[in-house]
Amino acid sequence: MRTAPIIIEHVSHWLEYFTLAELFFVLNEDARISLFDKFRIGKIASAVRHTFMSDQLDEHVKMLIEDLSTAFCQSRPLHKPTSLSSIMIRQNDHFLVPFRSSCPSCNRTLDVSDAVQRRIRLYCLNGSVVIGTMITFHCHQNHSNYLCNNDNSSIMIYPNFSRINNRNIYTHNSLYHGNYIYLGGDVAIERSVIDKYTAQIIHHDFSIIGIAASMNQEAFNLGYYQLAPIERRLLSNILHAYLIIQIDLSMGYASVSVPCSLEDFSQWAWEEFPRLLTCFIYLWANHRTLIGSCGEHCSKCLVVDGHQKSRRRICAFKDVKVETEEMKELLIGCCRTPVRWSRFCSLHNKETLFTANKQSKPNSQKKKINRKFIRYFSKKSHKKNGHLNVTGCRTIKERSDLYVQKCTRSLGIIALVSNCRIITSFSELYRSETIREIINLFAITIRVAGQLAPTCVYDDGCHLVKYIKNHIGADLSQTPAMLLLDSTPISVDRSHFRNHVGTFCRKTMNPDKNPLLKDVNTQAAEQTFSWLKQYAQIISNLNYQRAPLFMLVLFHLKNLSKVKRSTSCIFNIASAIPNVHGVSLCHLAHNTFQHSSTSQQNMQISINEKPTHSLNFQQIDLPQGTTDWDTKMRDIMSKRN
Ligand SMILES: [Zn+2]
Ligand SMILES: [Zn+2]
Ligand SMILES: [Zn+2]
Ligand SMILES: [Zn+2]
């Protein structure tokens, strides 16, 4: 017999009250509607009454389900009603269920009595905005031993995280659970919105504003229901947070703990930026060993270059200095976004109020003064360097330091890109000490990665080499990183080399005479920046907390696509990440008191003792170049006082 006699008996009993069709309908709905839906019986009963024009009581429907669902379940692979498979099978449209059904602390199996149901707005990929139902589990047991000291703190299991002590804890399993993503607040989004965004962002300059607008347009064109139009700020907060949590988890951390309110997320992410950047540098500078070689010439050389297109608004206060392991004093300028109606950030607005008032002359007059000063300055610098240019190289770009002084836009970014086009590290520029910031970027990269490529390329390489040779041991401390950089051969890239006409450059900077650069792409940074150019508009509209993280996410996604890895893959490097001080200069400016120079001793760097150049560096005296701005700056400052 296909059906057990006991079931036949039960079914025939219920057939006295229900028709066969009603019976079938009820059991189907029972299987479809989530177990954690508090109103499931009521819903099923009214659906039966509506569909069959009958007057079945809620109580009867409830008894029927209790009596038969176990038997009916014989055809379904369900045993434990709160098992994950049960949750997934019962998951239906617009229904968000917790990512686990047991308490992580007391291991209690949670059921409908622990469930709390609430309504949220759902942003779908096609632009429709609908009401969704979200179930969360609350465990109120005494969890004092678990992650918190608070005796009566409860643990809540959400669809994509658990909430303990007002922190949202994400794990790989929780983040990738379900078809919707809920990170807090009143809005969840369909997972495909993020999947689509992450796939497209590295190929197009999609701003999140543009995505929100196009989703709204699609909903309008096709007449999809929208509870309210998609709010771009909400959508961008969710995408931003998701991608950062994703990067954090992909570095091999077991869990990520973030503030429970999405509004506090930006500040949290900004504070975590140095750690994430350290992971980024460690991973990508060592991608050949950690991920696998991308070809014959993988990681043969690092190309450093500056990119001036992505410039965001920054505070006009420039006198921010930091101390690094190599430099006693590095002027970096303030990275923060100016407050409204001001040229200064909230930090420097008060400090500079007095001087700002003094300077508030009519605009035209200010411009005139500017121009006069620039003319004076350029004449002066010409006089000073003019005769040397005949023998030196022609790489001097005229740029007024006064302009930099007045400028309320960042100067773009500098980045180290491997010849296989992996972005290995980057830094934003707020001021003009380019050459010293490049040296610092090298130092940081060496300290984090524990190594440097066999050779480096820079389009103004001669001035970089000159600066290192002339300053090492003096205002550039002889750290292991500096010694390694000093012993690494640096060349000028192939397309810029013809501009370098000085004897020193001709002799030492020729990329074609550097055997390490044979068949190696020295244009990698330029190629990367021509890709980055399309994001200039997006980046220049971001504030100081978002911009560095957006770039981190963008570069990470770009690199992942280069090495053909999925965005959800995990690199188990978290335990290997060194604790390096000062990875992000602007963060250094915000907490200079936390200085510790312990990382210097713990470093393991293999330094090539023999310098590869046989030239005598004692006599290097190049004309002042673009990048030797410190001296010029000091010059100007002394003139002004
Ligand atoms: Zn518990
Ligand atoms: Zn590579
Ligand atoms: Zn400021
Ligand atoms: Zn040169």
Image (cartoon, rainbow, N blue to C red):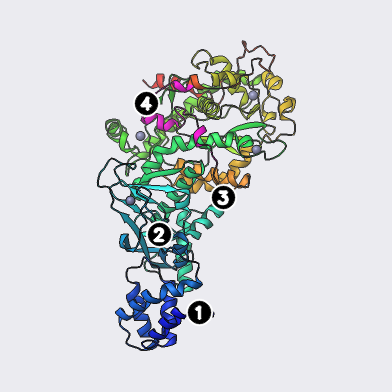
- As shown in the figure, which amino acid type bears the numbered disc 4? Gln
Which one is in front in this view, the residue at disc 3 or the one at disc 1?
Answer: 1
Where is residue 50 drawn, in percent x and y?
Answer: 36, 85
**Which percent across, then down, holds residue 409?**
44, 38
The magenta region covers 571-599
- The residue that mark 4 highlights is 594
Residue at 57% x, 23% y: name it: 625
Q: Residues within 10 Å of mark 4 (few under 14, many from 20)?
A: few
Kind of element beneath mark 4: helix
Of the image marks 3 and 2, the number of the one nearer the N terminus: 2
Residue at x 48%, y 15% (from the top left corner): 475
**CB atoms of marks 2 and 1 within 8 Å:** no
Q: Is residue 593 magenta?
A: yes
Of the image marks 4 and 2, the number of the one nearer the N terminus: 2
Q: Mark 3: which amino acid?
A: Ile
Q: Quadrant of the C terminus?
A: top left
CB under 8 Å between callouts 3 and 2?
A: no
Residue indicated by mark 3 = 202
Tag 2: Cα neighbours inside 10 Å, few (<14), some, or many (≥20)? many
Q: Is residue 343 left or right of residue 177?
A: left
Question: What amino acid does circle 2 point to?
Answer: Ala
Nearest to N terminus: mark 2 or mark 1:
1
Quadrant of the rendered structure where residue 330 is?
A: top left
Q: Position of residue 263 (x, y in %)?
A: 34, 49
Element marked by disc 1: loop
**Residue wearing tag 1:** 3
Residue 396 lies, with reference to residue 133, above or below; the image says above
Q: CA distance from mark 4 to mark 2?
A: 38 Å
Kind of residue indicated by mark 1: Thr
Q: Secondary structure at mark 3?
A: loop
Q: Within 10 angstroms of label 1, few (less than 14), some, or many (20 or more) residues?
A: few
